[in-house]
Image (cartoon, rainbow, N blue to C red):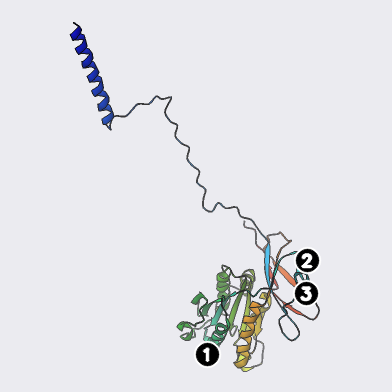
Amino acid sequence: MFRRITLLLLLAFFVALATTRAARQDPQTPQKKNPQQQQKPEPEKKTEPEDDVIKVETNLVVLNVTVTDFGEQYVADLKAEDFKVFEDGVEQKTQGFGFDEMPFAGAILLDASGSMEHKLTHARAACARFVEGIREGDVFSIYKFGGTKVKLLQDFTEVRDIPDSVWEMRADSLTPLYDAVVTASESLSKREERRRAIVLVSDGGDSNSRASLDEAVKQSTNAGASIYAVNLSNSGLYKTPGHDPGVEAMKNLAAKTGGRFFSTPGGQALRDAFASTVEELRRQYTLSYESSNEKQDGKWRKIEVRVSKPGLNVRTRQGYYAAKKKG
């Protein structure tokens, strides 16, 4: 009897052991969980959108200011307290001030319209003269405009070489001058350089732009780009009399953006003009202020900069268009 009981116990032990091993080795056998012990699903992690960034609205205005004496020599010894800035007649509190020889970004716009057919040599020479004067750290791009298009011939570079496309330019009917200014302004607005310039070489007669003169002024002033206009009109090259609306448009662009208008572009005058432009861009005062006018009305705001020392000429952009509230 004792032996029989012992054998039965041993048999039961081995059966239980075999069953346990089989359950462990069979990957298809799921292990049941106590419903009360089942893990709760982890809550989904909230993914922040990439553009979910706190945006701070600012009314900061940056001005590049040229100061010269009666001899047109640049004045370099002024202090922050020598300047006063007014916006629509209201004095503003200056926050930033500097007079360092900063590198600049320039965009050269070459008129390749039909009226320029016999003047392209002058346009190429103007482009070459400007590029000759740039120094280490300065960058420039080159566009041509004619017909219906504004075409990039060379993107921003420090290399002082003129691409073959400049020498191969051919005249092409109409003149999208204002479109060219808008295109260059948009590219300059993305640059990190605080000093920006557009060198416009043209006879001034826009005839095929989607943009208006006002839009060209708006884009260039808001980009902080000064326009230096080289007059290749018949009145400029050949001293022909009469009122030329194209020339007046170039003067307007230069004045409102704080640049210069060059009425005598030939020979030594051309070389002097571009040498002066490069020097000017490196010897400007940079002022900044946060506008006290917080309205987002899209209106033109007039800027005036005064210096305390008498007998000095001050030149900067004449204003800017305020941001316009969306909706």
Hey, what amino acid is under mark 2? Glu
Q: Earlier in the sequence, mark 3 or mark 2?
A: 2
Q: Dot 2 lies on which element? A: strand
Q: Dot 3 lies on which element? A: strand
Q: Earlier in the sequence, mark 2 or mark 1?
A: 2
Q: What residue is shown at x 73% (from left), y 70% (from top)?
A: 303
State how far apart marks 2 and 1 are (Cα).
Answer: 47 Å
Q: Position of residue 199 (x, y in %)?
A: 59, 80
Q: Which labelled disc corresponds to residue 91?
A: 2
Hey, what amino acid is under mark 3? Val
> Closer to the observer: label 3 or label 2?
3
The front one of 80 and 105 is 80
Would residue 163 be seen by someone viewing this image from the given angle? yes
Q: Earlier in the sequence, mark 3 or mark 1?
A: 1
Q: Position of residue 55 (x, y in %)?
A: 61, 55
Q: Dot 1 lies on which element? A: helix
10 Å crowding of disc 3: few (<14), some (14-19), many (20+): some
Q: What residue is shown at x 27% (from left), y 24% (from top)?
A: 20
Q: Image quadrant for the C terminus?
A: bottom right
| Residue underneath mark 3 | 307
Q: Position of residue 255 (x, y in %)?
A: 68, 78
State how far apart marks 3 and 1 are (Cα).
Answer: 41 Å
